[in-house]
Amino acid sequence: MCGIVGYIGQQQAAPILLQGLSKLEYRGYDSAGISVRNGEEETVIVKSKGRLKVLAEKTNDGLAVKGNCGIGHTRWATHGEPSEQNAHPHASEDSSVVAVHNGIIENYQEIKEKLEKKGYVFYSETDTEVAVNLIDYYYKKHDGDPLDAIAKAMMRIRGSYALAIMFRDYPGEIFAARKDSPMIIGINNSDVFIASDVPAILKYTRNVYYIGNMEIARLTCGNVTFYNIDKEEIEKELTEIKWDEEAAEKGGFEHYMMKEIHEQPKAVRDTLNSMIKNGSISLSDAGLSDEELEKISHIYIVACGSAYHVGVTLQYVIEDMARVPVSVDLASEFRYRQPIMEKDGLVIIISQSGETADSLAALREAKEKGVKTLGIVNVVGSSIAREADRVIYTLAGPEIAVATTKAYSAQLAAGYVLAVQLAKVRGKINEEKYTEMIEELLMLPDKIAKTLEDKERIQWFASKFSNAKDVFFVGRGLDYAIGLEGSLKMKEISYIHSEAYAAGELKHGTISLIEDGILVIGILTQQELYEKMISNLVEVKSRGAYLMGLTVYGNYGIEDTVDFSVYVPKTSKYFASSVAIIPLQLMGYYLSVSKGLDVDKPRNLAKSVTVE
Ligand code: AGP
């Protein structure tokens, strides 16, 4: 996720671009840049690595860059590490086309290869530069018409994009093109704005056009013209934005956490699409060959917090599906217990930030012992990503809330894909099962979105327990792993003490804690363990527990046992965590809100624990 802005009007562009970008830093902040035109003069491009303030200092808050027409970008790296080279705007070799982009171009490799054969030379690792040169190619090949060049490029590109584009031969004009990535176009008399999101332009106008998918816009001073992909002009209605600035930064949600809970379908879809191409898995971006996967003798998953819970889930999934031995360790324990690892093992470090001190130390410990390492990381160019031998990037975008949700879900998705490929190359699943697993994976985003439709019921139920002192999560197999994460969500943002137990463990001590009215959340997605779980729930109910049952559609008999039931869409037993965790994230969120707590910044916690 990145932030793009554009401006054309009577004022100096650079200060307006920087101001807009400052309101979009929540979308990405590892590098930034602007490109401004001053009449017929050549385009000026200024870029910098690091936060936006570096660019502001470089341009004296934009005062050093003259011109009334420009575009800008604040980056969250997905292709190519954070660097000035990879920062946007990107330009074709002769700067005939300059653009900024938010989105992911899935087929950028194949387009890049074709353009290189036509003599194009690339200076960056980004998918955006490929888009710029593709537009340049069509522009030069077909009589220099920007609209036509953009439309042709849009027909060729697969993926998502919000593009703001300037052409050297068309000073005083900015073009915009959109598919799936957010973009709005604001207008206020002679001033016209482009932005990824409302906060960037609220200071200047509340009147916006929403550009649709596969649509193009041409901006000039005080005017916007919209076109469809066939270059036919289309009419648009102006809309007035009612949100205040703070609400706008959260996409209209009250908290970043709720916004990010709702971004999970996209985070999972983008991550899956980066690893599954044309119906089969490709780990080439991670540099993981099938030969390497075949040779792995043991997998050691090491992480902290929610990332550790992903590891617990993946242990069940990988061992059951691929029959590879898997160990899971808390990084803070792993690094001090003198772990014994097989030389043909693979250590997988899971980390959203890629900077967690314990996880980074565990990575270094593994490398010292000569064991191959793989990072599953959300932040491109982070320490763990750079130091691991291989890296799979999750494409969740920046996660602002301390309590992770979309990154956790994206990590699960990446892990599932790895498990399926392991199972395939090691002959544990046949072609038919492989295809079935992939189809099931690609349906997950919609199933997650479906689960979100139940949030009002969860909100009502959560409000009944805002004074709870102890809550128990119980499950068996994968449902136990889901309970671990559900419990952490509740603890870290509502400050209610809770524990997750393997349901079969209750009778070995914990059941003594069950008293009248204590909330016990039973998780029952694993069909072969369902009856055993019902027995466990009956046990705790007989001791006074108040039961919530979380299971899949169709298991309506659970209502004979529990006091409140939540249903999620059926999916492969292996992938159940991805749908079942949603109601538990919502439980924690609504409990925190009902207690008036700081959901996004819970007490004593940091988003990334970079110290021991
Ligand atoms: C999860 O909600 C917490 N914020 C925390 O447990 C987090 O998962 C843990 O600190 C690991 O962080 P990382 O993924 O950035 O390494």
Image (cartoon, rainbow, N blue to C red):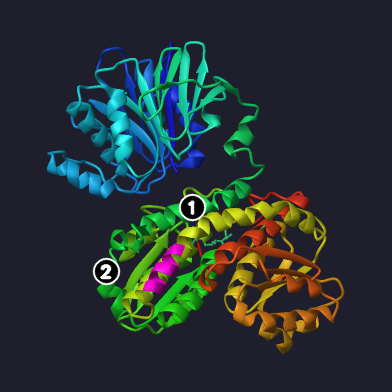
In the rendering, at what x and y percent does residue 297 appear? 34, 83
As helix, strand or loop, the secondary structure at mark 2 comes to loop
Left or right: 152 as drawn, with respect to 600: left
Q: Residues within 10 Å of mark 1 (few under 14, many from 20)?
A: many
Q: Quadrant of the N terminus?
A: top left
Q: Quadrant of ligand 1?
A: bottom right
Q: Main secondary structure of the magenta part?
A: helix
Residue 357 against residue 32 in the figure, above or below: below
- Residue 384 to residue 334: above or below: above
- Determine whether the residue tagged by mark 1 lies in a helix, strand or loop: helix
User: What amino acid type should be assigned to the residue bearing mark 2?
Assistant: Ser
Residue 191 coordinates in the image, percent (x, y): 47, 15
**Whether residue 591 can be seen here:** no
Residue sitting at x 22%, y 25%: 96
Quarter location, residue 151: top left
Which quadrant would residue 393 be assigned to in this image? bottom left
* Residue on which disc 1 sits: 267
Q: Earlier in the sequence, mark 1 or mark 2?
A: 1
- The front one of 21 and 540 is 540
Q: Position of residue 177 (x, y in %)?
A: 39, 31
Q: CA distance from mark 1 to mark 2?
A: 25 Å
Residue denoted by label 2: 289
Which amino acid is tagged 1?
Ala
Q: Is residue 117 left or right of residue 58?
A: left
Q: Is residue 80 above or below residue 195?
A: below
Judge left or right: residue 77 versus residue 152. right
Residue range in magenta is 432-439
Foreground: 31 or 502?
A: 502
